[in-house]
Amino acid sequence: MKTRRLLALVPVALAISLVLGDALAAQPPIVPIKPNLQPDPLIINGKSGGGNKSNCGNIASAPNQVIQVTESLPYLRLTVAGTGKPTLLIDGPGGRFCVLADSYSGGKPEISGYWQAGNYSLHIGELSQGQYTYTLSISQQKK
């Protein structure tokens, strides 16, 4: 009797470990952002959008990128360019912010200014349906 119960639990345990393994594997590596960033700009490519509706467009359940600002920076600029209608959702030490494209930034989601030290989860959202390629540019240079 006990052997049957144990054998019945093996597929369940295997399925749970596969799901958790996939969730952990879906987390992007943390990219450290230090003063005198090299290369500058740092370019990261990926796919925007996802299956979760948010106030910042359709996003994936896991962040597209995690950056770690190792020490407070007086100026840092993040810009997203994409083939769809990308958005930038930032979840960090200062709160959660949604950045949309505007005419000042050339129609691209962009945020710049002072960044305090800490980890920032970046979701590259999408206002339209589907997923599109994007380029995230991280720079310490002012335009």
Image (cartoon, helix red, strand yellow):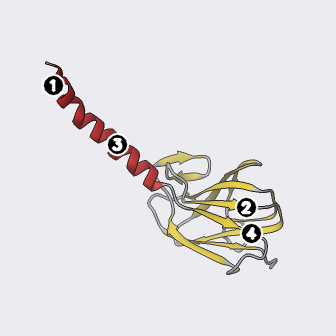
Image quarter in which the C terminus is found: bottom right
Image quarter in which the N terminus is found: top left
- Give the CA separation, mark 1 to mark 4: 55 Å
The residue tagged with tag 1: helix, strand or loop? helix
Among the 4 quarters of the image, the one containing residue 66: bottom right
Report which residue position mark 4 lands on.
Answer: 34
- Give the CA separation, mark 2 to mark 3: 32 Å
- Give the CA separation, mark 1 to mark 3: 21 Å
Report which residue position mark 2 lands on.
Answer: 69
Crowdedness near tag 2: few (<14), some (14–19) or many (≥20) residues, C-alpha within 10 Å? some
- Disc 1 marks a residue whose amino acid type is Thr
- Identified at 52% across, 59% down, the residue is 28
2 or 1: mark nearer the eye: 1
Is there CB contact under 8 Å for labels 1 and 3? no
- Disc 2 marks a residue whose amino acid type is Val
Q: Foreground residue, 8 or 129? A: 8
Judge from the rendering whether residue 74 lies leftward or rightward of residue 62; answer left or right: right
Crowdedness near tag 1: few (<14), some (14–19) or many (≥20) residues, C-alpha within 10 Å? few
Looking at the image, can residue 18 be seen? yes
The residue tagged with tag 4: helix, strand or loop? loop
Report which residue position mark 1 lands on.
Answer: 3
- Disc 3 marks a residue whose amino acid type is Ser
Give how far across and how far down residue 96 sits, in percent.
70, 47
Among the 4 quarters of the image, the one containing residue 41: bottom right
Crowdedness near tag 4: few (<14), some (14–19) or many (≥20) residues, C-alpha within 10 Å? some
Report which residue position mark 3 lands on.
Answer: 17
Looking at the image, can residue 134 be seen? no
